[in-house]
Amino acid sequence: MAGTNKIVKVSLSDQVSEHLRQMISDNEFPVGSKLPSESELANMFGVSRLTVRMALQKLSAQGLTVTRPGDGTFVKKFNIAAYMDEVSSIVMKPEMLDDVLEFRLCIEGEAAKLAMDRITPEDLRRMELLSSKMSGFVYDYEHPKSFNLNEYVELDFKFHLALCKCSHNSLLVLAYSAAKAPVCAYLSSINTIRVKQYHDTHPTVQTVSIEKITVNNGHADLLQALKNRDIETCGKVFQRLASYSIPLNEALS
């Protein structure tokens, strides 16, 4: 039937592993801490111990945990986020901005393709909320300090991470989450330049929507394309992102 959305079947073990991965990401289970036992996790999530065991195996395969026989499962001490923070300053170099852009186009482009069959109403609501929050940001050229760039960049990153989550592929989400530091450094750099460039070409404008000058309303267009399951339009939005970004890299040279 035309227009009927496909039902996405996500296994219980995938759901449990995703919940645990998010809890680790949110530092509810800090690096080095011991996870609850299989029995405790089974009771916590209302699933069987076998389901929990499969979920823990997924986390181990992703490099997030290590299981010590007779001792339990622990969050690995290797902290990818800390590592990415250390190298994020490299992204500020002009020659590295294209690398971040290519990474984003690869990960987000593939996520969008998978989302065509897997996206859920909850996924869309999450992206709509983030898009709505970003649309409220206005830049006042007479009072530039009133604009919180870090807050906007954080929402921008969460929006694109939400796109990755629409793929329901845990490795795509993990890869994008791990690259948060360089991606946010990239977003901060290009958004700062776009604000300046817009004022250079529109000197009489006092206030303007950040969404208009940073992505030409690309977030709203991408969200609508996802709602319509329109991969062709998604591709055009990504190309627009690339065409906006590459000249900016040259401007930083």
Image: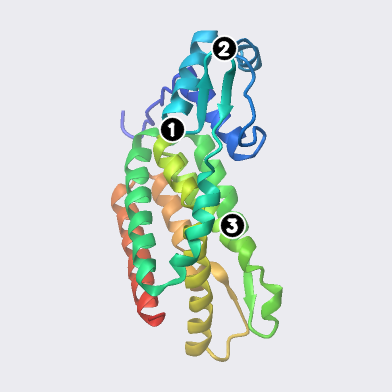
Quadrant of image for the C terminus: bottom left
Disc 3: CA contacts within 10 A as few (<14), some (14-19) or many (>=20): some
- Nearest the camera: 250 or 130? 250
The structure's colour scheme is rainbow
Earlier residue among tags 3 and 2: 2
Q: How many marks do you count on the picture?
A: 3
Earlier residue among tags 1 and 3: 1
Name the residue type under label 3.
Glu
Residue 140, picture quadrant: bottom right
Name the residue type under label 2.
Gly
Disc number placed over residue 62 in the picture, else none:
1
- Nearest the camera: 33 or 43? 33
Disc number placed over residue 70 in the picture, else none:
2
Identified at 51% across, 51% down, the residue is 83
> Which residue is the site of mark 3?
154
Residue 15: x and y in percent read 51, 24
Disc 2: CA contacts within 10 A as few (<14), some (14-19) or many (>=20): few
- Nearest the camera: 166 or 102? 102
Mark whose residue sits in front, 3 or 2: 2
